[in-house]
Image (tube, grey):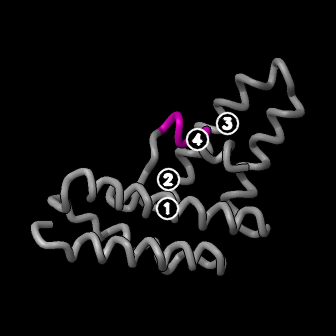
Amino acid sequence: MALVHDMGEAIIGDITPADNVPKAEKARLELEAVRKMAAMIQPVNAEFAAEVVDLFQEFEDGETEEAKILHDIDYFECLCQRNEYESREKGARDLDEFETLVPKIKTDEIKAWTRQLVTERAAYLAKPGI
C-alpha cells in the first residue's frame, strides 16, 4: 500500500501543505497518476493492475488499520523532511506550516515518534545562532 501511494507521488511529485493544493485536487491528481501506472501494468498483469488501484483507494479512504498507520507515517515523514530542510539551511527557512500535520497523527506509536521529533526540532531551533 505504501509503495502504491508513493507511485502517484512519483509521477506528480510530493504535494506538501506549503503547496496549498486542496485535498480533493491532490487526491484527484494522485488517483489519475495511479490509474496511468495501472494502465501500463494491465496488459502484463490485469489482476495486479486492479490491485494497485484498490490499494491506492484503500489508502485514500483511510478506513483500515494499515491505511491509518500509513497516513500517520506519511505525515511523520513530512515532518522529518521539514526538520532536515531547516537543519540543512541552518534555520534560515521557517517551515512552521508543517506543524498542521502534527494533530492529524492518530496512532499512539507514531504520536510518540512525533513528540520526540518536535522536541528535537525545538531544541535545534533554540540553539544560539540558529
Q: Which of the marked residues, 1 or 3, is nearer the chain's N terminus?
A: 1
| Location of mark 3 (residue) | 35
Whole-angstrom CA distance, mark 2 to mark 1, is 5 Å
Give the left or right position of residue 62, taking residue 25 as reference.
right
Q: Amino acid at mark 3?
A: Arg
Residue at 67 percent of width and 36 percent of height? 35
Q: Which mark is residue 8?
A: 4
Q: Which residues are magenta?
A: 7-12
Q: Amino acid at mark 1?
A: Lys
Q: Earlier in the sequence, mark 4 or mark 1?
A: 4
Determine which quarter of the picture holds residue 91: bottom left
Q: Secondary structure at mark 4?
A: helix
Estimate the spatial distance between the alpha carbons at disc 4 and disc 1, rounded to whole Å: 14 Å
In the displayed structure, does residue 43 sit left or right of residue 57? Answer: right
Q: Quadrant of residue 106?
A: bottom right
Q: Which residue is mark 2?
A: 26
How far apart marks 1 and 3 lie (CA) works out to 18 Å
